[in-house]
Structure formats: C-alpha cells, structure tokens
C-alpha cells in the first residue's frame, strides 16, 4: 500500500529545484507588487474623504423640500416681523402691536420647525440660521 504523499509525487511531474525557487520568487514579487499597488491606490487622506462625504450629506439635506420650505418660512417671518417692528418704532399707525405679536408667533413657530429638523438631521446645524435657532433653544 502506498501513502498519499507517494501517490501525489508519482502523479505530478517532476519540477527541478531551481524552477521551484524561481516560481516562489515570482509569486513573492507579485504579492509585494500587489500590496504596494493597494497602498498607492488608497486615498491619501481619510479625513479629506470624510469631509467630502459630510459636505455631500449637508448639501443633500439642504435640498430636501421640507428644509427648503422651513428656511423660506423662517426668512419670510423674520422679514415681516422686522418690517413691522421698524414701522412701529418709526411711529407709523399703519401697523399695530397685534400685527407685531402675530408675526412674532409666526417666527417662533418657524423656529420650532427648524429646531425639530435639526434634531432629526443633526448635520443641518452647520447652516447659520439653523445653528442660531438651535443655540437659542439650548440657551433657554
């Protein structure tokens, strides 16, 4: 009875020792070159890739319809409230304190919506208006 090793050696063609060394050298060289290529193909700075991904997420979050509408609503309410406030300070009788109170309430509700959006999508806190709203909410 023959051992498995003897059977395998008998069925495989004989390879000279010098050729075995050359094959091992070629395989080792190929492995080193593959490892080097993997290192050079890697991004030079992981932090820069992370920054790019965050920028993309931020821009995508700003482009959603809900965020756009909330920012527009806040901007409009702020402009109306400021306009009425200036008119009242100037002595105009075209607007009343009730008008100012109504637009103050509108501005407050717009700020609440922005604060809720910031809680749901924290990357939006990078926007200056939303950051200001969140800072005021945290301050209270």
Image: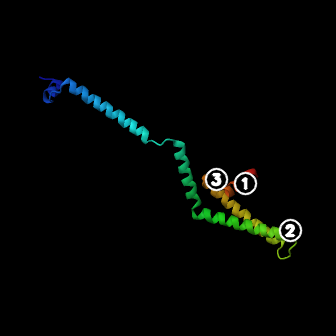
Question: Is 38 in front, or is 70?
Answer: 38
User: Residue 8's spot in the image, x, y percent?
Assistant: 16, 28
The correct choice, above or below, for 40 with respect to 61 in the image is: above
User: Residue 14's spot in the image, x, y percent?
Assistant: 15, 27
Q: Quadrant of residue 113?
A: bottom right
Q: What's the residue at 72%, 52% (across, down)?
A: 135
Question: Label 2: how many residues lie within 10 Å, few (<14), some (14-19) or many (20+)?
Answer: few
Where is mark 2, residue-wise?
A: 89
- For marks 3 and 2, the one nearer the N-term is 2
State the CA–CA distance, disc 3 to disc 1: 15 Å
Q: What's the residue at 80%, 72% (across, down)?
A: 99
Question: Is 111 in front, or is 30?
Answer: 30
Where is mark 3, residue-wise?
A: 126
Task: Identify the secondary structure beneath mark 2.
Answer: helix
The correct choice, above or below, for 19 with respect to 128 in the image is: above
Q: Quadrant of residue 136?
A: bottom right
Question: Label 3: how many residues lie within 10 Å, few (<14), some (14-19) or many (20+)?
Answer: few
Q: What's the residue at 32%, 34% (across, down)?
A: 30
Where is mark 1, residue-wise?
A: 137
Mark 2–mark 1 CB contact (< 8 Å) = no
Question: Label 1: how many residues lie within 10 Å, few (<14), some (14-19) or many (20+)?
Answer: few
């Amino acid at each position: 009875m023959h051992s498995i090793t003897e059977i395998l050696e008998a069925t495989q063609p004989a390879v000279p020792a010098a050729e075995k060394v050359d094959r091992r050298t070629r395989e080792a060289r190929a492995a080193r070159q593959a490892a080097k290529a993997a290192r050079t193909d890697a991004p030079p700075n992981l932090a820069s890739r992370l920054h790019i991904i965050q920028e993309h997420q931020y821009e995508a979050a700003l482009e959603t319809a809900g965020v756009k509408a909330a920012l527009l609503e806040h901007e409009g309410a702020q402009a109306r409230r400021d306009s009425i406030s200036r008119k009242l300070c100037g002595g105009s009788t075209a607007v009343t304190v009730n008008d100012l109170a109504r637009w103050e309430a509108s501005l407050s509700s717009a700020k609440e919506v922005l604060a809720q959006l910031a809680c749901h999508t924290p990357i939006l806190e990078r926007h200056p208006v939303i950051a200001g709203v969140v800072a005021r909410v945290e301050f209270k």
